[in-house]
Amino acid sequence: MNVIKLSVFLLVSTLLLMMAGCIDNPSNEAASESGNESETGTEAPEVEEGEEVVNIGYSGPLSGPAAYYGERTLNGLTMAVEEINDNGGFEVDGQTYKFNVVALDDKYLPNETAANAKRLLQENQTPIIFSPHSGGIKAMQVFNEKENFLIGAYTSEPDATEAGNELTVRIPPSYDGYLEPFTKYAMENHGEKLAALPTASQYGKDWTEALVPYWKEQGGEVVYNSSIDFSKDTDFFTLVTNALKEEPDVLFIGGPSEPTAKVAKQARELGFEGGFIVMDQAKLDEMKSVTGSYEDLEGSVGVTPLINSDYPGTAEFVEKYKEEHGQNPGSEAGYHYVAMYTFMEAMKAAGSVDDPEAIRAHMQEGLDALPEDKQVYTIEEIGENGGFTTNLRIAAVEDGGVVTINVE
């Protein structure tokens, strides 16, 4: 009897062990998702004897509805790093260095950005961490000066630099410069009744809070003011229908290019014949890849697509990007490419690769040293508040194509 009981016990134990091996452990799965599986970037560079590696951090949306946007920002960064490494790295005070990009997915969530930043600092000692959304940037600004790291801030949100954070570099132009030319174009070409349907992110809220009062100051009327949560909403029929019931002349839309294009397309399908003010995160050429042509985007005003720009290094960068990624680059890729080269030149001028304050203090020298063939955008200076200054250019869709508009 004891032998039978022992045999049954061993059989049951074996079955339990086999079942355990077939059942996913939730804690292990979560750890995996927050661990190496969410990490990407450049391959660790090959270093020769005497060379050292500088880790560069990145936290952005690499999954979810904004993943395509996050991937393009990361593409520009990694292209610059790979070029630098392939050319033998760079030298600071006689020491040769190469870069390694460590990229983490934050799903466009500010709390994830903050957690990623702490991880990048603890595990990779990154002197610079890039983020392509204002919510994530603001989350890092809570502690970046104390923890002593630079934020490469890809946001047009003015507050990113107006807050006085001395270790933040804002890469694209501030969006407040677009208010006047966007409003002027839309009013002159379409009318004075505006319906707002931007992204529900903090960036979208801030943009709306700037545009709505400006529109009213110019004599316009805001007939509808809501937003779209692109992380939750995939069908915009009800939201767009509610906005169009107020018979607007202009729709204010924006966020990542792909869902923004779907909003515009759905508005046309519902009979909207007016114009669009497109927030600067969305790009007209990228929206066209979703709509299939510029027909649905006729009358839109937005930022000038990179492929329609003519800075000294633009054409070469576009060609390289298309060869590597099989598509045209957007401004987010171009700006990250320029920014990485500028940070490298600032490190040279500062005589340090790991002193964020010294690197920040030498950013103007970094801009001045940037070779023409790397000037995908020509950035003339960095302001006292840490924002790059670029000549403002806008574009509109007219007669089925993109036309550029000079801004005084």
Image: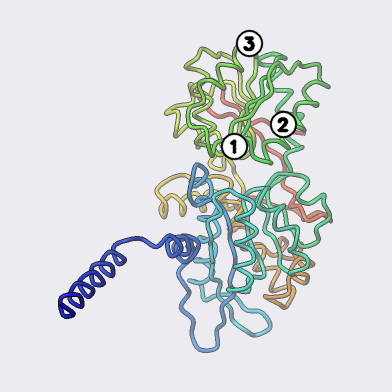
Residue drawn at x 74%, y 43% is 174
Q: Residue 236: horizontal and vertical position, in percent? A: 51, 25
Work out whether residue 358 or residue 124 is closer to the camera in this orientation and state it.
124
Residue reaching furthest to the bottom: 49
Quarter of the image holding residue 223? top right
Neighbours of disc 1 within 10 Å: few (<14), some (14-19), many (20+)? many
Q: Which residue is mark 3?
A: 247
Amino acid type of the residue tagged 3 in the rendering: Glu
Chain-order first, disc 3 or disc 2: 2
Work out whether residue 160 or residue 317 is closer to the camera in this orientation and state it.
160
- Measured Cα–Cα span from mark 3 to mark 2: 19 Å
Query: In the drawing, what numbered circle is on residue 255?
Result: 1
Amino acid type of the residue tagged 1 in the rendering: Gly
- Measured Cα–Cα span from mark 1 to mark 3: 23 Å
Assess whether mark 2 and mark 3 are in contact (beta carbons under 8 angstroms): no
Q: Which residue is mark 2?
A: 208
Q: Residue 149: horizontal and vertical position, in percent? A: 71, 67
Quarter of the image holding residue 240? top right
Q: Residue 244: horizontal and vertical position, in percent? A: 59, 14
Tell me if residue 84 comes above or below residue 162 in the rendering: below
Neighbours of disc 3 within 10 Å: few (<14), some (14-19), many (20+)? some
